[in-house]
Each structure stands twice: as C-alpha cells, then as structure tokens.
C-alpha cells in the first residue's frame, strides 16, 4: 500500500491533468507509470509487445506490470491485441511528454518507431497500418506542425499520382488519426484533412460525400488548394462526364434474414450500341483485397459439399486492382443482337444463340471467343478499349469490399439470387429453384452497384485456367500461360459467379471453375454468359 505522503504526491500529479481518466490514473499509480503512459501515447496504436519495448528502451525503471495497467486503464481494444488510447487522453499525454522530456525525446521515439515497424514488416505486412506508417509525423506535429502538414501533403500528392484509390483510402485513414491534434489544427491542417476526406469518399464511391468536401474547399480556395509547396487541384466530379445512380445494398445473417439496408451511389456512363440499344458501365474504384479462400473454410466446404474442387481457391494472396469500368449487368440478348450486326473483326456472331429467349435475359450459349469478338466489335465501334475482365478484377468487383462468402453476407437465398438451392449454405431455408435464367437486375446489387454477381449465368474471364493460385499475378492482370494472350491454344478458360444451375457453394465470391473456350452447345453452356470491362483512361472518348 502506498504511504500517505506518496498518496498526496500522486494526487498532485493527477491534478495536473484535465481528463478524469488521467487524474484517476495519476492518483492511483504515480509518476513512473505516468511517464511510461506518456511514451505509450506516441504510437498511433499499441500492442502489449510494443508497450513492453517502449518500457525496455525508455522507462525500464517502471515495473513490468505497468504495461497491463496502462492498457486496462487508458486504452480501448481496436483489434486482436491492438489498442488505442482515447484521443483526448493521448493528446494530453503527448503534450506532457513534450513538456517533460523535450523535443529530443520525440525524435528518439520517432526513430524507435520507424525501426520497430521495419522489423515487424518482415513478418507482418500490415504492421505499418496497425501501428502507423509515419511515426515521424507524430513528432513533427507537436514541435514543427507546419513542417508536418507539408510532409503529409507531399505524401498525399504522391499517393494521388499513383492513381490507385486504395492508397488514398489507406493514407486518409492515417491522416484522420491527426484530426484532433491541436498544434496541427492551429497551424492550418483542416483544409488538407477535408481534401483527404474527399479523396477517400471518391475512392469508396461515396460521390455525394466527396462532392460535399470538395465544394466546401472550392468556396474558400477556388480551383486549387495550396499546402506549402504542394498544390492540389480541387476536383469537380461532374467534370468526368459520369452520371450517378442510387441503389440499395442489403446484408443478411446466417439465417438469410436481412439485417441491414443501405442506400449507396455509384458513377457510370452509358454506351450507345446502335439501334437504340445501350450498355451501362459502372466505375469500379481501384484497391487491394485478399483473393481466395482460407484453408479452414476450404476444408469446411469440401466436407459439406463433398467436392475437392474448392481446393483450387488457394493460397490466399493480396492483389492490387487498378480502377476500371464493369458492365452493370450481364450482357443481355438484345445487346448481343445489336453488336452482332456491327462489322466483323475475327469471327461471325450468331444473332440469337440463347436457349432461354428474352431481350432482357442474359445471353448464353456463347463461347469464350464469341465473348472476345463481342468486346472487339464494341471497341472498334466506340473507340474505347473493351475486354473481358481478369479473374482478379471479377472477384474484387464481386466482393465490393466484403470478405464474406457472398457480397450480401454469410449465406445466399433465392430472394437475393438465381441459383439451384439443392442444398443450403448456412442456416437459411431452401428456396425456389427457377430452372432458367432471369432478367438482369432483378435482384439487389452489391456495394459497387453491380448486379447478378452471384448466379443467373456463369461469366467468362479473360484468364487461362490454373489449378490454384501458385504463381498468380498480384497486380490484377489476366493470367496467361504464354505471351500470346488472346490467341493461345490452351483449351480452358476461367468462369466465375455461378448460374441458375449452380449449387450455393459454387456461387460464392471466391468460387472458380472452367470450361472449354471453343464449346458452343452443351448442358453447361446453357448457363454460360459474360459481362464486359472497359479501361478507365479512355472512357470519355
């Protein structure tokens, strides 16, 4: 038990803080614990291991039990063994750190964190995201805030130059962690923060939020935002000639019950195919995702459905996809017929190949080379570069930021997709088997505004078929066995998405299979169609 004198001293220590948690912590534990807490405030996030290392390198006179006391008393859990100090607590501790230990200690902590993160990156590629990729900004923020703001602006400028929206989102998340740092706000950080939030919303497809942020800046700064030597052009989203549409996204639980409804917006353009027929192409923002299925889930699928086939969905790997446009719907029979009348490129196209007839039904009974010819004809007709999407692009677009088996959640139901419910996937009821294709767009879209990614018809991808992901590209490009690309002799190509004929396990976001490129009519071919992709850089031609 502390003596009465120590208790009085601790009370005085606690009174120097304004936040009640820090008052209580200081009164209870005293100066040594508070000094370690000040050092713990420097990283954006904490792990027990990192806090032990901070103690060892900077405050080794503090009892080791202080690590647990700091985490339990001052932190909130934000992940597995990952914690954050409450923002107001963190800022008050940082101010005390600067006052009591000086700028030199802030620089030492910055050097320590850089070295620590580099070491962790050797075993954990997410270490920079978990612990803060730019610890030197934290040091600068409290004694050279103007320099910190310009440094952050240069990092954002570099990220935007890469034209990879995933980098914008990742960096904005880091920038957001400095939103309540008073020295930065007092030194003009707010405009940069608003600009970063607009870029983040634009990358996520939240057009309305992005435009609100950019409009706020344009009212004050005009067309350009100047941060030190860095100048940002403030976007006007209408300038990209894209239209906006609104749609509803649903999420279901394992019982197939809708547990959330959300209204979203996406951007798109409409292509004129001639004779009054159009094609809607939706903007898919670039980003990074984990492709494939975990080993544990694969073994569950094999056991449940009795097929080893699911083992071709591994190993899981990180893929970065550049922005592109994707067909809002699977190619319909009326779109197919319109393009079939366009001038031939390499092969003839049968105007009405489908088994199930209907203008708004997806076209089927088309082989891979037919689908490529369709893309080539639109490319010549429009001057844009149309193509089939890669397998990685398909899964990225299907998931639309989700990691669940289906983009709408933990399971699939016949109210959400057209498939063969010959078995349940989770705890949902067995639904309706329609035994044929359904009109495109009949069911709810995913968060990118793309429809029928699960079921209706299988979709051709550009890639050759491979038994697993060993050696697969990580840049989102199509995977060919040689450089001959579209004219190689390999017989099998990728299919994705499942169809009206597919069991639920084969309609998942990660499910992959193949068919003969040249085959035209077979039982399976009644269920094979496609949709198209378009390159971003020439969409406005």
Image (spheres, grey):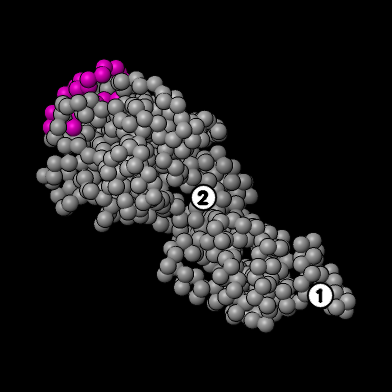
Mark 1, Cα crowd under 10 Å, few <14 / some 14-19 / many 20+, is few
Percent coordinates x, y for residue 527 in the rendering: 26, 27
Q: Main secondary structure of the magenta part?
A: loop
Please, what secondary structure does the residue beneath circle 1 have?
A: loop
Residue depicted at x 26% and y 25% = 363
Residue depicted at x 20% and y 37% = 515
Establish if 312 lies above or below 100: above
Establish if 510 lies above or below 244: below
Instruction: Residue 269: tell me if it is visible.
Output: no
Instruction: Residue 356: tell me if it is visible.
Output: yes
Would you say 403 lies left or right of 465 here?
A: right
Would you say 390 lies left or right of 225 here?
A: left
Residue depicted at x 55% and y 39% = 208
Residue marked by disc 2: 199
Residue depicted at x 26% and y 30% = 529
**Camera-side residue: 232 or 144?**
144
Q: Does the stretch in magenta take in 350?
A: yes
Q: Quadrant of residue 389?
A: top left
Residue marked by disc 1: 1
- Residues in magenta? 347-367
Q: Earlier in the sequence, mark 1 or mark 2?
A: 1
Quadrant in the picture for the C terminus: top left
Would you say 70 lies left or right of 299 here?
A: right
Establish if 369 lies above or below 176: above
Percent coordinates x, y for residue 464 in the rendering: 20, 45
Mark 2, Cα crowd under 10 Å, few <14 / some 14-19 / many 20+, is many
**Camera-side residue: 350 or 190?**
350
Would you say 84 lies left or right of 154 here?
A: right
Please, which residue is most extreme toward the top here? 357
């Amino acid at each position: 038990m502390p003596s009465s004198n120590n208790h009085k001293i601790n009370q005085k220590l606690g009174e120097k803080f304004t936040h009640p948690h820090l008052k209580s912590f200081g009164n209870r534990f005293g100066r040594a614990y508070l000094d370690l807490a000040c050092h713990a405030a420097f990283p954006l996030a904490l792990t027990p291991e990192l806090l032990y290392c901070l103690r060892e390198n900077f405050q080794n006179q503090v009892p080791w039990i202080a690590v647990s006391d700091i985490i339990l008393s001052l932190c909130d859990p934000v992940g597995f063994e990952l914690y954050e100090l409450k923002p107001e607590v963190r800022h008050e501790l940082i101010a005390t750190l600067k006052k009591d230990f000086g700028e030199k200690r802030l620089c030492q902590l910055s050097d320590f964190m850089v070295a620590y993160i580099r070491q962790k990156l050797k075993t954990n590629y997410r270490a920079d995201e978990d612990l803060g990729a730019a610890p030197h900004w934290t040091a600068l923020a409290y004694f050279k805030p103007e320099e910190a703001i310009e440094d952050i602006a240069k990092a954002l400028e570099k990220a935007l130059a890469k034209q990879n929206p995933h980098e914008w989102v990742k960096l904005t998340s880091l920038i957001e962690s400095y939103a309540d740092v008073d020295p930065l706000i007092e030194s003009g950080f707010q405009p940069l923060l608003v600009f970063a939030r607009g870029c983040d919303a634009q990358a996520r497809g939240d057009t309305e939020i992005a435009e609100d942020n950019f409009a706020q800046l344009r009212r004050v700064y005009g067309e350009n935002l100047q941060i030190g030597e860095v100048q940002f052009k403030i976007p006007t989203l209408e300038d990209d000639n894209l239209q906006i549409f609104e749609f509803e996204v649903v999420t279901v639980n394992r019982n197939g019950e809708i547990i959330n409804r959300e209204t979203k917006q996406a951007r798109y353009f409409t292509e004129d195919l001639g004779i009054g027929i159009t094609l809607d192409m939706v903007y898919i923002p670039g980003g990074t995702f984990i492709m494939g299925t975990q080993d544990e889930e694969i073994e569950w699928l094999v056991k449940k459905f009795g097929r080893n086939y699911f083992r071709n969905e591994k190993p899981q790997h990180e893929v970065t996809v550049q922005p592109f446009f994707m067909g809002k719907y699977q190619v319909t029979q009326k779109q197919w017929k319109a393009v079939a009348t366009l001038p031939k490129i390499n092969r003839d196209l049968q105007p009405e190949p489908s088994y199930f007839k209907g203008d708004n039904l997806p076209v089927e009974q088309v082989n891979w080379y037919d689908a490529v010819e369709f893309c080539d004809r639109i490319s010549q007709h429009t001057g844009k570069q149309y193509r089939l999407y890669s397998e990685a692009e398909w899964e990225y677009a299907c998931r639309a930021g989700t990691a669940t088996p289906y983009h709408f959640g933990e399971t699939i139901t016949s109210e959400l997709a057209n498939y063969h419910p010959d078995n349940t996937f989770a705890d949902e009821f067995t639904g309706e088997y329609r035994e044929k294709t359904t009109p495109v767009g009949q069911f709810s879209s995913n968060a990118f505004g793309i429809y029928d990614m699960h079921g209706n018809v299988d979709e051709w991808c550009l890639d050759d078929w491979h038994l697993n992901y060993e050696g697969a590209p990580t840049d989102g490009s199509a995977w060919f066995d040689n450089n001959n690309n579209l004219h190689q002799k390999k017989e099998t190509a990728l299919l994705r998405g499942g169809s009206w004929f597919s069991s639920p396990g084969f309609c998942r976001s990660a499910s992959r299979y193949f068919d003969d490129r040249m085959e035209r009519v077979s039982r399976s071919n009644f269920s094979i169609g496609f949709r198209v992709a378009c390159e971003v850089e020439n969409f406005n031609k």
